[in-house]
Each structure stands twice: as C-alpha cells, then as structure tokens.
Image (cartoon, helix red, strand yellow):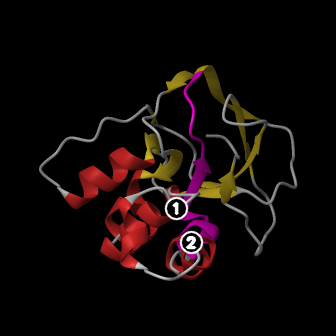
Amino acid sequence: MKFTYECDGMDGLILVDKKYLDEINETILYELDIFLDRYGKSELVYDFPDEKWEDVRKRETKDLIEFCNSGKMVIFLHYSDEENCEIKFSELKSNSRTAIDLKSGKLLLVNASELIQCLTYPDLEMETILEIDNIDSGFYYLNFEGIKDIILQRKTGVCSDYNNVIEFYTY
C-alpha cells in the first residue's frame, strides 16, 4: 500500500495497532514529545534548565521506549517529507529486531505529532496517513530502508530484544 509522509519540522512516523491507543497515557505522550526533539530545539528544553538535552532525552523517554519495545508501537523519527512510500506484507522469513504485535489486525500509520494532539484532545478526529484493516493478528517483523519501503513479515518464534525506535539523522 502506497503512502506519502508529510511532516512539519520535528515529527515521526508511528505504526501502531488501533487496540493500543487506549494504553498511550499522558506520560507516554509527554515522553514522545521529548523524543521527537532530537536536538533540543523546542520549548521543552526550558523544563530542564542546566541539563544536557541528550541526557534529558535519554532519561525522560524510558516509558515510551519500553512501550515501543514491548511490540506495541514502532516509531521512525524522520524530519523530512517522503513521497512514494510503500508498506507491504511478505511471506519471507526475517530475523529483524523491529517487530509489532497486531492484536486487532488494524494497523495505523500516523504522524507522531498528530497522535500526540489527538490523544491529548480526544474530541479531535485523528488524521491517519494510512489504515490497514483485516490483517491476521500476530507479531510481524519490520524490514525497512528508511520509511520509503517497509515490509512486514509474519513472525514465528520469540524475540525478547526489540528495537522499535528508529532514528534517522536528518534535519
């Protein structure tokens, strides 16, 4: 399925099963806001005077990283627009350390900034990048070369060491 990723400055692409939206609390949203500011350029730096931003960011995003690495969400930190992106499913086996648990079979691709805004203000309607329904439930490995080409492969076996937070160094 094709999609276009558009962002305004500090943002990221999130892949999440719709089921887990209710588990994203205020703490995780605040940590996501901190995480999106890779270089300490937002007003959030004023909440932590006299501290190195890299130390703050590492310390203050632990719940977010744990949530993602439990297989509930994948974040691609990406600060530039991308056209002609594609997400597809493959039967090939993979040993990637990036994986997502699709319990409900409804995968959302959404900008991180949109997720923060709409979960903070529930009356707003979330504008997703892409919604994929009717996926067989289960864990899926993600293979990718940036966000332009994401391949999900049904996972067999167990992996306990996920890396679901991917940072691309652009700005």
Q: Left of 142 or right of it: where is 81?
A: left
Q: Vertical placement of 97 versus 55: above or below?
A: above
Residue at 61%, 79% in the rendered image: 55
Q: Quadrant of the N terminus?
A: top right
Q: Which residue is mark 2?
A: 53
Between 95 and 128, which is closer to the camera in this rendering? 128
Q: CA distance from mark 1 to mark 2?
A: 6 Å
Picture coordinates of residue 132, whole percent (x, y): 48, 34
Q: Quadrant of the C terminus?
A: top right
Q: Left of 94 or right of it: where is 106?
A: left
Q: Which residue is mark 1?
A: 40
Q: Vertical placement of 40 versus 124: above or below?
A: below
Disc 2 packing (10 Å; few <14; some 14–19; many ≥20):
some
Picture coordinates of residue 79, whole percent (x, y): 56, 39
Q: Is residue 88 part of the magenta span, yes or no? A: no
Identified by mark 2, the residue type is: Trp
Q: Is residue 74 part of the magenta span, yes or no? A: yes
Residue at 47%, 52% in the rendered image: 17
Element under disc 2 = helix
Extreme residue toward the top, this view: 84
Q: Contact, CB < 8 Å: mark 1 with mark 2?
A: yes
Which portion, as a residue range, is magenta? 66-82
Identified by mark 1, the residue type is: Gly
Residue at 27%, 57% in the rendered image: 119
